[in-house]
Amino acid sequence: MAATPRKNKTARRILAAGAGLVTVGALVAAMPSAGAAGDRSGGGHGHGHDKGQGRLVDVQLLSFNDLHGNLEPPTGSSGRLTHLNEDGTTRTIEGVGGVEYLATHLRQARQGHPYSITAAAGDMIGASPLVSGLFHDEPTIEALNGLDLDVTSVGNHEFDEGARELARMQNGGCHPTEGCFEKGKRFQGADFPYLAANVTNEKSGKPLLDPYFVWERNGVRIGFIGVTLEGTADIVSAEGIKGLKFGDEVETINKYAKVLERKGVKSIVALLHEGGLPASGAYNYDCDSPGPGNGISGPIVDIAKNVSPQVDALVTGHTHQAYACTIPDPAGKPRTVTSAASFGRLYTDTTLTYDRRTKDIVRTAVASANHVVSRDVKPASDMTRLIDRWKTLAAPIANRPVGHIAADIENPIDAYEKPLGDLIADAQLEGMAPADKGGAQLALMNPGGIRAPLSHKASGAEGDGVVTYGEAYTVQPFTNMMTAVDLTGAQLVTTLQQQVSGPNQAAPKILQVSKGFTYTLDMTKTGADRVVVSSVRLNGEPIDPAKTYRVAMNEFLSGGGDGFTVLKEHKNKLVGASDLDMFTAYLTAHSSASAPLPVPAADRITVVK
């Protein structure tokens, strides 16, 4: 099926006025007023006949989130979904996702819907597999243009390479240091607006990007407000976001809902890169059973309950979960809240019934459902060509073998200790243990930095069990530099407690630990009490609160990322090689075709439930 025509870029916001901008402050100062640029008309896709001239018009909202540059079908557990059967049992759906198939599903879904909008809720780029990440996610932006994405919010990963690089993603231009990746071709940037209403310049208070976008077709107007989670600064590198402030999600959405209302836009959707945790991992779980929103927890619940009733729907992300719920707004009226898992495995189809007389959405008629991006449809040929083009450029690096594994080494999202986490922590310990490399005695790895499993099945011509550089890169795409630091035993224990308390209490972030470091988590308790302090041991010896230990971790963690504020108190930091280099070196040193690496036992953290 042919792609719909690409939208023109004449209305796109210009973020960078010239090559001389060197700071976020200068970047924001050079931008035009957000209010002037934010009210724009979207062309719409216009599939089918021009219907809906009566009072009520059904507007189709197709949405997804957390693509993370997964152009090719994700592998292993990243390419699976859980389906809830009518009898309460579950089954696993294998082989889902991939933009070739996402494109086909979206194009088929649009047929017969003259009023169709495609929107996303952030993390389109960042932590991407090598075929996109190696080229600073230019391939993903190009693919999203081809998917006819109308608008997206930023997510935390849009800031992985800093605000200047995000500006380049929006406006185009070749990479400032690596130049143009294809001879004779200049990167064109995104055809769709990135929205960042709550990301502002600390001094001026002006938004970094457009705060909102107005889609219009035949008099039907729907406003979109885009925000990322307020805690973005805690989970990205501080260097790239200097001079930026990340504001409260609810306050920001409510502020711009009033702005849109004053402009006569009464139908409003919030694109919010923050999410929830449904009680079931099945994509088709009814989180409104037995009552509205009762089957979902996490930050999105309080946010949804406080976002202005002027907002008609919330498209969310960040937690990589799947749900289509209704959560009451402050007036007690049900409002749809959706998320389409991650990696392009699902898309959400929401029907917004627009009343031409009131210019608002008839909330009682809103219906949402998540749909599987199955691979039993014909792949979109334009996406296939795009992927093949970039894979050819990446091949000399991507296809190099770096190790061998005996079976799938998984990274299950619902497990506190992950086999792949053990492997990575061991690699980091080995890389930082020599006296001249840092003298590390143990290693800690943040779970969010592990982006994909290692699959035994060959992804190309390399053969089953062979791990290529491209596959290793997909697991650890951030290229964080490793550090070795001094921590006291007391600080180590506090680190473990911060996994399950404070900002991490509702959604624990369990660090992956290297061999020899063991302890017990008692999840029947609450907060810091979940860590059984007397059980914390290194090589069988109890941790001494007064003793100093050398600990390996990436720079994201040693900077206090993911809520581990105690790690910022470290001393005597030594910087080593990158996490990816250590990972590939370990795979090469510890495996061969005749002696592949076995699956780690994941037996270092004892969990009491």
Image (spheres, helix red, strand yellow):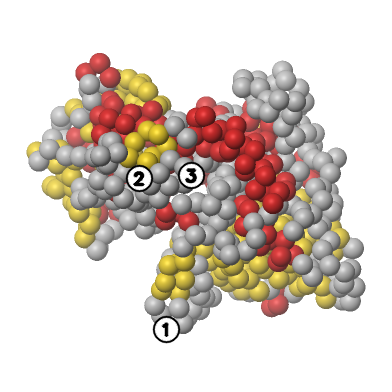
Q: Residue at coordinates 71% horizontally, 25% vertically from top-left?
A: 183
In this rendering, the answer to whether 365 lies above or below 122 is below
Q: Residue at coordinates 67% horizontally, 59% vertically from top-left?
A: 104
Query: Which structural element holds mark 1?
Result: loop
Q: Residue at coordinates 59% horizontally, 67% vertically from top-left?
A: 371
Residue with the mark numbered 3: 460
Question: Upstream in the sequence, badge 1 or badge 2?
Answer: 1
Question: Upstream in the sequence, badge 3 or badge 1?
Answer: 1
Expressed as whole percent of the image width and height from the top left, the position of residue 499 reads: 32, 47
Q: Are marks 1 and 2 in contact (CB under 8 Å)?
A: no
Mark 3 is surrounded, within 10 Å at the Cα level, by few (under 14), some (14 to 19) or many (20 or more) other residues, namely few
Q: Please state, as top left, top right, bottom left or bottom right, where the C terminus lies in the image.
A: bottom left
Disc 3/disc 1 C-alpha distance (Å) = 39 Å
Query: Which structural element holds mark 2?
Result: loop
Q: Are marks 3 and 1 in contact (CB under 8 Å)?
A: no
Residue with the mark numbered 1: 87
- The amino acid type found where label 3 is placed reads Gly
Disc 3/disc 2 C-alpha distance (Å) = 11 Å
Q: Is residue 52 visible?
A: yes
Mark drawn on residue 465: 2
Q: Is residue 299 visible?
A: no
Image-based side of 204 in relation to 132, left or right = right
Expressed as whole percent of the image width and height from the top left, the position of residue 427 reads: 29, 34
In this rendering, the answer to whether 373 lies above or below 424 is below
